[in-house]
Amino acid sequence: MQIRPIHTEDDYRAALLRVEALMDAEEGTLESDELDVLVTLVEAYEKNLCPIDIPDPIEVIKFYMEQNDMTPKDLQPMIGRMNRVYEILNRTRPLTLPMIRKLHSELNIPAESLIKEPAYA
């Protein structure tokens, strides 16, 4: 097992090829250990290469609504009256801490996605 740090795109491609070759390694073997180490290196390289920013909270809510066939009316228990729901969705009013807590607990939307400062139009 000869493992090197991933510094370049060529190193990255070579590591991916080796990971692919090791995918069927039997647990507890040197090959499976090599696979574990290589996957960790690849993940670290990808994280540094393409950091994923936390999305805008309003976009997160809209995406969740779309994925779960929800309407603005379905947000009333978490946000309040319909005018308040539309103010939130139209970015004219910020989410409050109680709204964030309810959206997180009732819809399982990650809290870190909801606390980011939204982009206002």
Image (tube, helix red, strand yellow):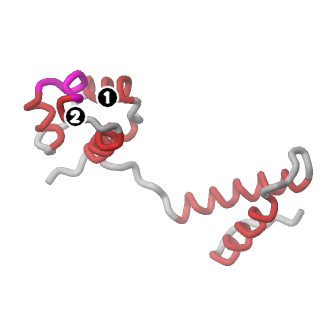
Which x, y percent locates residue 53?
A: 41, 53
Location of residue 83 by image quarter: top left
Secondary structure beneath disc 2?
loop
Residue found at the very far bottom of the displayed protein: 10
Which x, y percent locates residue 93?
A: 13, 38
Q: Is residue 45 left or right of residue 104?
A: right
Residue annotated with mark 2: 95
Which x, y percent locates residue 4?
A: 78, 67
Q: Residue at 62% across / 62% down in the picture?
A: 45
Q: Amino acid at mark 1?
A: Leu
Secondary structure beneath disc 1?
helix
Q: Residues within 10 Å of mark 2 (few under 14, many from 20)?
A: many
Q: Is residue 1 left or right of residue 72?
A: right
Q: Is residue 81 left or right of residue 42?
A: left
80 part of magenta stretch? yes
Q: Residue at 30% across / 43% down in the picture?
A: 66
Q: Nearer the viewer, residue 11 or 79?
A: 79
The magenta segment is: 74-81
Q: Is residue 67 left or right of residue 37?
A: left
Image quarter in which the N terminus is found: bottom right
Sequence-wise first label, 2 or 1: 2
Question: Overall secondary structure of the magenta stretch?
Answer: helix
Answer yes or no: do the residues labelled 2 and 1 have beta carbons within 8 Å?
yes
Which x, y percent locates residue 36?
A: 77, 51
Q: Residue at 39% across / 49% down in the picture?
A: 54
Q: Residues within 10 Å of mark 1 (few under 14, many from 20)?
A: many
Q: Nearer the viewer, mark 2 or mark 1?
A: 1
* Mark pair 2, 1: CA separation: 10 Å
66 part of magenta stretch? no
Location of residue 103 by image quarter: top left
Q: Residue at 14% across / 44% down in the picture?
A: 90
Residue annotated with mark 1: 103
